[in-house]
Image (cartoon, rainbow, N blue to C red):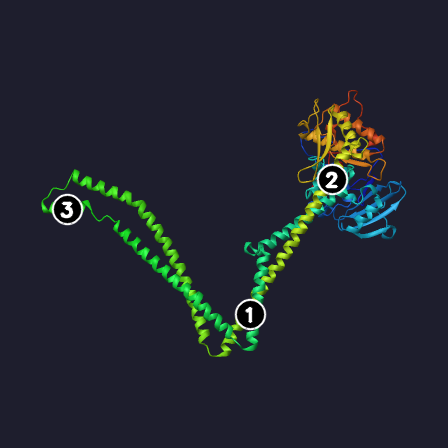
């Protein structure tokens, strides 16, 4: 699969780009001196990649320039001609106004113009978006990618500036790792299906654990003993059966006897005990109150001085001072004692409130029992026993719900244990698979590793290591690092220019490793030479051309200031390699020959 042509129904505004089999250059020339120091020039160099993605049926995004400036582009229809593996072509038609509807035409001639074709001339027309994606997937015939969709891995061959931040996780993979790691593992030669199954098992495990946690929270800590609930349920059901029999027979003698026994053995005893307890507490409280009052110092030196003065007795100087010190001393030694007494009185008050509340409840219970025993109206006793029966049945229903919930919780716990075991097994199999593929010299991953290092070493004269490992969570971690002379990882790969180089090397290494399979044969890299020095640019261009000779297609974009300066002053690119020239001398130099947006 290669790119063949990108064009629109508005050739006067957008000139068609016809791609060659090998190297294709989109070159932006900065001709005006005042623009040379600007970071962005808004000519449309990077827009080519976005339009290719649109042609490959990217989802509609309101932030995408075609829809963000809908008033400018609403009448545009884009056509992407793709060369298939068997040498035939398929053209994808997609309009801006109705981007969710797509048309397809398969043909055998290169660089066709189907912009004026009638609806009946298309093989498939007005195809709904999701169906269109599946249809294009079948046209492309990328069998090696199965069971993954072509869009899952397209981003590695359509690298925008935003995709150079990480070799493996593209901008479009901002979501869960399970969305992209299995497919990436697959094209690297690992068992991607196993990785996907492990993520699915982990997700299922998390859901079951969440269900179990919800049931535990609803039950509460006091309802976690299934044996206890079964016992209580048995007693409640037996009691309900007896009450039902009594109600049906209008026979309340057993209830009278039970209430009499309960009144004598339980209620009256509890009331007497609580009254005795209350008496004791009230007595202690009175003692504490008296002690607190006795601790007050009633002697006032000022009053005493005034009294002695009135009687003509001298009371001043050292005598008054001694009394004040004595009072201060007494206050100090009783302060802590008063604190303890106050605290004890508060505890007694709290106990008294609790006892009074319990006595009130027991009094009500005693009153109800006496009323029932003295009641001669059988219908009144019938009503009371019926109400008791309703309460018992409600308790039974509640206990049964708790029991059912506990049974579900037990089942969930058993399922969680099984899922954990299955997940651990899968993690073990993934580890075995990674170790085997990494260790085998002839494995697909080993070939990709060698190509990756070969590209980096040829460009910057430094070795690079591509590695995959299983982390503590049982997931795959991918890494691409530059190595120093001692074979240790360096921090050089953290710089933007080297990070970009690692991304380009990774993409090309994958493409080369899959040359013998139904796999994409093109790579688009935006701003390919930015931040590299001239010698490294020349080296990278040599690598790209060498890969073109192997049968791979490269589409690269750059501005003329990033062109490597050749020693002989010759042109860097052949005329046939430059498929699109942009410049800053007016709107005619832009990709879309219109004012910038």
Circle 3 SS class? helix
Relative to 369, is 127 above or below? Answer: above
Q: Residue 338: x and y, percent?
A: 31, 48
Query: Is disc 1 in contact with disc 3, using a CB cutoff of under 8 Å?
Result: no
Residue that mark 3 sits on: 306
Circle 1 SS class? helix
Tell me the residue at 34%/53% (across/down): 345
In front: label 1 or label 3: 1
Direction from residue 243 to residue 300 in the image, left or right? left
- Position of the N terminus, as image quadrant, is top right
Q: Residue 380: x and y, percent?
A: 49, 77
Q: CA distance from mark 1 to mark 3?
A: 79 Å
Relative to 211, is 28 above or below? Answer: above
Q: Residue 140: x and y, percent?
A: 83, 43
Tell me the residue at 36%/55% (across/down): 348
User: Is 147 or 354 nearer to us in this picture?
Assistant: 354
Q: Residue furthest left?
A: 312
User: Is 264 or 479 nearer to us in this picture?
Assistant: 264
N-term mark: 3 or 2: 3
- Position of the C terminus, as image quadrant, is top right
Q: Residue 463's image quarter? A: top right
In front: label 3 or label 2: 2
Direction from residue 91 to residue 402 in the image, left or right? left
Q: Residue 271: x and y, percent?
A: 40, 64
* Label 3, residues with CA under 10 Å away: few <14, some 14-19, many ≥20: few
* Label 1, residues with CA under 10 Å away: few <14, some 14-19, many ≥20: few
Circle 2 SS class? helix
N-term mark: 2 or 1: 1
Q: CA distance from mark 2 to mark 1?
A: 59 Å
Residue that mark 2 sits on: 430
Q: CA distance from mark 3 to mark 2?
A: 99 Å
């Amino acid at each position: 699969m290669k790119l063949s042509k990108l064009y629109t129904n508005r050739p006067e505004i957008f000139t068609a780009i016809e791609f060659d089999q090998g190297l294709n250059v989109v070159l932006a020339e900065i001709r005006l001196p005042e623009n040379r120091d600007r970071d962005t020039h808004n000519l449309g160099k990077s827009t080519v990649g976005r339009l290719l993605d649109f042609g490959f049926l990217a989802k509609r995004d309101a932030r995408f320039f075609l829809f963000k400036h809908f008033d400018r582009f609403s009448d545009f229809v884009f056509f992407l001609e793709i060369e298939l593996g068997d040498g035939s072509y398929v053209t994808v038609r997609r309009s801006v106004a109705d981007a969710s509807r797509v048309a397809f035409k398969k043909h055998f001639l290169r660089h066709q113009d189907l912009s004026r074709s009638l609806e009946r001339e298309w093989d498939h027309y007005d195809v709904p978006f999701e169906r269109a994606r599946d249809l294009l997937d079948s046209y492309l015939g990328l069998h090696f990618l199965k069971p993954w969709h072509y869009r899952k891995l397209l981003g590695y061959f359509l690298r925008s500036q935003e995709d150079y931040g990480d070799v493996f996780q593209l901008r479009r993979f901002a979501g869960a790792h399970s969305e992209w790691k299995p497919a990436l593992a697959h094209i690297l030669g690992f068992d991607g299906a196993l990785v996907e199954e492990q993520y699915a098992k982990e997700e299922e495990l998390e859901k079951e654990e969440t269900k179990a946690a919800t049931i535990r929270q609803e039950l509460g800590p006091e309802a976690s003993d299934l044996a206890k609930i079964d016992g209580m349920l048995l007693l409640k059901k037996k009691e309900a059966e007896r009450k039902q029999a009594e109600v049906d027979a209008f026979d309340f003698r057993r209830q009278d006897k039970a209430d009499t026994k309960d009144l004598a053995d339980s209620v009256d005893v509890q009331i007497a005990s609580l009254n005795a307890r209350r008496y004791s507490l009230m007595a202690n409280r009175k003692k504490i109150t008296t002690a607190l009052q006795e601790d007050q110092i009633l002697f006032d030196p000022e009053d005493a001085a005034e009294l002695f003065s009135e009687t003509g007795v001298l009371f001043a100087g050292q005598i008054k001072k001694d009394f004040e010190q004595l009072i201060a001393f007494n206050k100090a030694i009783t302060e802590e004692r008063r604190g303890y007494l106050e605290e004890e009185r508060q505890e007694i008050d709290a106990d008294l409130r609790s006892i009074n509340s319990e006595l009130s409840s027991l009094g009500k219970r005693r009153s109800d029992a006496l009323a029932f025993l003295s009641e001669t109206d059988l219908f009144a006793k019938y009503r009371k026993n019926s109400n008791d029966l309703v309460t018992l049945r409600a308790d039974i229903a509640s206990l049964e719900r708790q029991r059912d919930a506990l049974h579900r919780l037990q089942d969930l716990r058993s399922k969680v244990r099984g899922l954990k075991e299955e997940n651990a097994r899968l993690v073990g199999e993934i580890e075995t698979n990674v170790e085997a593929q990494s260790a085998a010299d002839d494995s697909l991953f080993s070939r990709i590793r060698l190509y990756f290092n070969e590209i980096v070493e040829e460009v910057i004269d430094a070795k690079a290591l591509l590695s995959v490992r299983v982390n503590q969570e049982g997931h795959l971690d991918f890494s691409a690092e530059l190595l120093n002379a001692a074979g240790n990882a360096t921090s050089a790969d953290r710089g933007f220019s080297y990070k970009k180089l690692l991304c380009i090397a990774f993409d090309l290494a994958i493409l080369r490793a899959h040359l013998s399979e139904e796999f994409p044969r093109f790579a688009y890299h935006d701003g390919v030479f930015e931040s590299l020095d001239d010698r490294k640019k020349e080296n990278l261009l040599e690598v790209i051309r060498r890969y073109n000779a192997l049968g791979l297609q490269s589409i690269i974009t750059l501005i003329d200031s990033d062109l490597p300066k050749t020693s002989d002053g010759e042109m860097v690119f052949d005329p046939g390699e430059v498929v699109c020239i942009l410049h800053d001398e007016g709107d005619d130099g832009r990709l879309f020959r219109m004012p910038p947006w």
